[in-house]
């Protein structure tokens, strides 16, 4: 009887331990992944890739109304376009990523949507930090990026990338909105003939010089005439005296 009783107790203890493990596993299950991302082509430098996101609903009182995503380095907001989303939800670019949302989803409904990215960057992994806003104003922040395999409480959606395909290259950036410097050389001072104002001034100086020469000649002629007249008068007076 004692052996049977002991076996029964051990059996009950074993069942209790298994039950405790199941409870712990259920409680820890949702914490394993709150927001996830997957890709149609998870390779570095892949083009026109569809990224699919799933954000789990955690609130018991309100549904998800908006998701704000911070894009990782190498993906710009203008390179992302909306592909699929809940009815009525729209995507709006932000300075560091995008926001997608609309009418709040029913309580307990996960938010699922997908976007198309022009090209993935040449990285090993991409973190998409996400803020979940519920209809009652509550915000869940999935923004932590684990380092060296450590576990975090609020992990950001993380996409692991494979090596780029052979020959894959970054897409050339689009035309810049800023003005492009002209390729034409800047004008340099001309070594040709003087401009009209300079030529006019030169001609004026030449004219004044010529006028001065003519005036001097006239004055000299008058002076010579006066001297001749004086000499003639002196000769005439002297002759009359004689």
Image (cartoon, grey):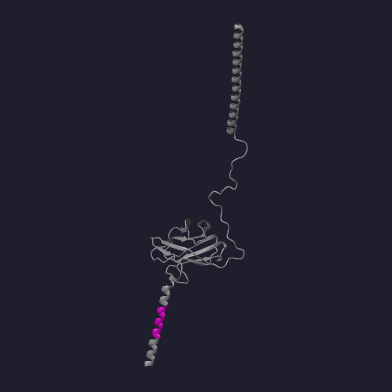
Nearer to the camera, 79 or 7: 79
Identify the residue shown where x is 46% and y is 63%. Answer: 129
Report x, y in % for residue 100: 47, 59
The N terminus - image quarter:
bottom left
- The magenta span reads 11-21
Report x, y in % for residue 138: 39, 62
Identify the residue shown where x is 38% and y is 90%. Answer: 6
Identify the residue shown where x is 42% and y is 74%. Answer: 26
Nearer to the camera, 70 or 106: 70
Q: Is residue 100 above or below residue 211?
A: below
Identify the residue shown where x is 36% and y is 92%. Answer: 2
Residue, far front: 242
Report x, y in % for residue 199: 60, 32
Asked whether, in this view, residue 24 is left or right of residue 175, the answer is left
Q: Is residue 59 above or below residue 205?
A: below
Q: Main secondary structure of the magenta part?
A: helix
The image quarter in which residue 230 lies: top right
Report x, y in % for residue 106: 43, 63
Nearer to the camera, 217 or 120: 217
Q: Is residue 162 magenta?
A: no
């Amino acid at each position: 009887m004692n052996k049977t009783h002991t076996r029964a107790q051990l059996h009950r203890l074993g069942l209790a331990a298994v039950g405790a493990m199941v409870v712990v596993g259920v409680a820890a299950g949702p914490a394993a992944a709150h927001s996830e991302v997957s890709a149609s082509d998870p390779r570095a430098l892949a083009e026109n890739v569809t990224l699919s996101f799933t954000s789990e609903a955690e609130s018991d009182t309100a549904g998800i109304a908006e998701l704000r995503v911070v894009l990782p380095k190498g993906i710009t907001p203008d390179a992302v376009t909306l592909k699929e989303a809940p009815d009525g939800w729209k995507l709006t670019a932000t300075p560091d990523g995008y926001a997608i949302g609309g009418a709040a989803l029913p309580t307990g409904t996960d938010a699922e949507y997908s976007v198309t990215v022009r090209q993935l960057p040449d990285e090993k992994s991409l973190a998409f930090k996400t803020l979940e806003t519920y209809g009652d104003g509550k915000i869940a922040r999935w923004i932590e990026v684990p380092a060296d395999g450590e576990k975090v409480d609020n992990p950001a959606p993380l996409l692991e990338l494979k090596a780029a395909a052979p020959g894959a290259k970054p897409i050339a950036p689009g035309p810049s909105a800023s003005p492009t410097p002209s390729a034409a050389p800047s004008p340099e001072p001309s070594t040709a003939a003087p401009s009209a104002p300079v030529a006019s001034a030169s001609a004026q100086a030449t004219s004044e010089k010529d006028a001065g020469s003519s005036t001097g000649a006239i004055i000299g002629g008058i002076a010579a005439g006066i001297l001749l007249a004086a000499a003639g008068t002196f000769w005439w007076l002297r002759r009359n005296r004689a």
